[in-house]
Image (spheres, rainbow, N blue to C red):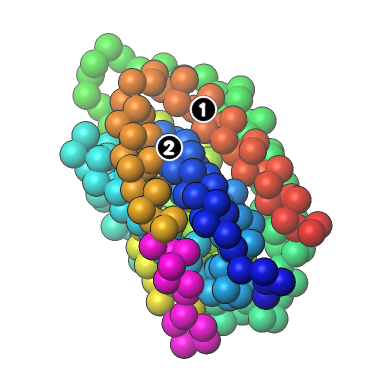
């Protein structure tokens, strides 16, 4: 609830922030809804409406960046087919549990995982591969299914897509190449965001004005970020992911203690 309604400049600043977040997210294959959420809640009509709006903005950003990654061939569709369904189902289940489990405690755990993942990825080095032999990495599909379900469950509880947890899981546990992690994560995140927003409709509809403005600003930002992905080497891309995870971990930690 606001003492005063948001001024026009508040909406302009919000759109600029959404654009900036979308550029960074499109680059590294993240939606970064946890960084955008506090600002969304400030100008939304209510907390519930703001959460739903944030999910819609996340879906718009993920879908836009995902299209760019599709055109560049940076999505592993086999991995997507295994990971998306358990992520969506678990996110819906998490929505039912959101009123039972302590949200702040879960955010604290997520913040700790993000910070650990950031420092862990900062030490990442490209695996040795033969010269252009065209071989595919040996992916752990069972880990992809399990990670998708667990992250989807946590995201449903706290109201976030949590691609920032899915990316390090795809890199370190599943074994996917960095060049395809970004696109695959965004493709999964798009559907998690869509179904997450639908799950909010029975209780309170999203703030459509905030969702529309945020999506309008995020779409071009996500497109720019996704186009920049291919200009980075694998090592540069993972370093960029590590830096973004560090910011996301700090932001989530602040939200947990707020």
Towards the viewer: 109 or 25: 25
| Residue 54 in sight | yes
Q: Which residue is mark 2?
A: 23
The quarter of the rendered structure image containing the N terminus is: bottom right
Residue at horizontal 62%, vertical 72%? 47
Q: Circle 2: is it few (<14), some (14-19), or many (20+) Cα within 10 Å?
A: many
Occupied quadrant, residue 232: top left
Q: Position of residue 42 (x, y in %)?
A: 63, 62
Q: Which label sits on residue 1?
A: none
- Looking at the picture, does residue 70 appear above or below residue 122? below
Q: Position of residue 104 (x, y in %)?
A: 75, 64
Towards the viewer: 254 or 205: 205
Q: Position of residue 203 (x, y in %)?
A: 52, 86
Occupied quadrant, residue 145: bottom left
Q: Using the numbered discs, state the Cα–Cα distance from disc 2 to disc 1 in whole angstroms.
A: 12 Å
**If you read the primary sequence from the N terminus, does the residue marked by circle 2 or circle 1 appear first?**
2
- Report whether 161 appears left or right of 115: left
User: How many numbered discs?
Assistant: 2
First to last magenta residue range = 201-212
User: Which residue appears farthest toward the bottom when viewing the image?
Assistant: 202
Q: Position of residue 216 (x, y in %)?
A: 36, 53
Q: Which residue is mark 1?
A: 240
């Amino acid at each position: 609830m606001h003492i005063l309604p948001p001024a026009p400049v508040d909406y302009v600043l919000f759109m600029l922030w959404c654009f900036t977040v979308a550029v960074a997210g499109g680059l590294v294959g993240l939606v970064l809804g946890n960084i955008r959420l506090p600002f969304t809640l400030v100008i939304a009509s209510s907390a519930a409406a703001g959460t739903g709006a944030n999910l819609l903005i996340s879906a718009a950003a993920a879908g836009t960046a995902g299209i760019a990654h599709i055109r560049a061939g940076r999505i592993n569709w086999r991995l997507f087919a295994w990971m998306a369904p358990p992520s969506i189902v678990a996110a819906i289940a998490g929505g039912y549990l959101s009123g039972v489990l302590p949200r702040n405690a879960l955010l604290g755990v997520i913040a700790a995982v993000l910070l650990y993942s950031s420092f862990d990825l900062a030490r990442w080095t490209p695996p040795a591969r033969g010269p252009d032999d065209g071989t595919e990495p040996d992916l752990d599909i069972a880990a992809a299914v399990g990670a998708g379900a667990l992250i989807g469950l946590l995201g449903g509880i706290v109201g976030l897509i949590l691609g920032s947890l899915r990316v390090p899981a795809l890199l370190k546990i599943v074994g996917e190449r960095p060049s395809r992690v970004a696109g695959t994560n965004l493709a999964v995140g798009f559907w998690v965001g869509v179904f997450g927003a639908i799950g909010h409709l029975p209780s309170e509809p999203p703030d459509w004005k905030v969702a529309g403005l945020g999506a309008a600003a995020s779409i071009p930002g996500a497109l720019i970020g996704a186009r920049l992905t291919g200009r980075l080497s694998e090592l540069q891309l993972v370093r960029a992911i590590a830096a973004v995870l560090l910011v996301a971990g700090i932001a989530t930690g602040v939200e947990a203690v707020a």
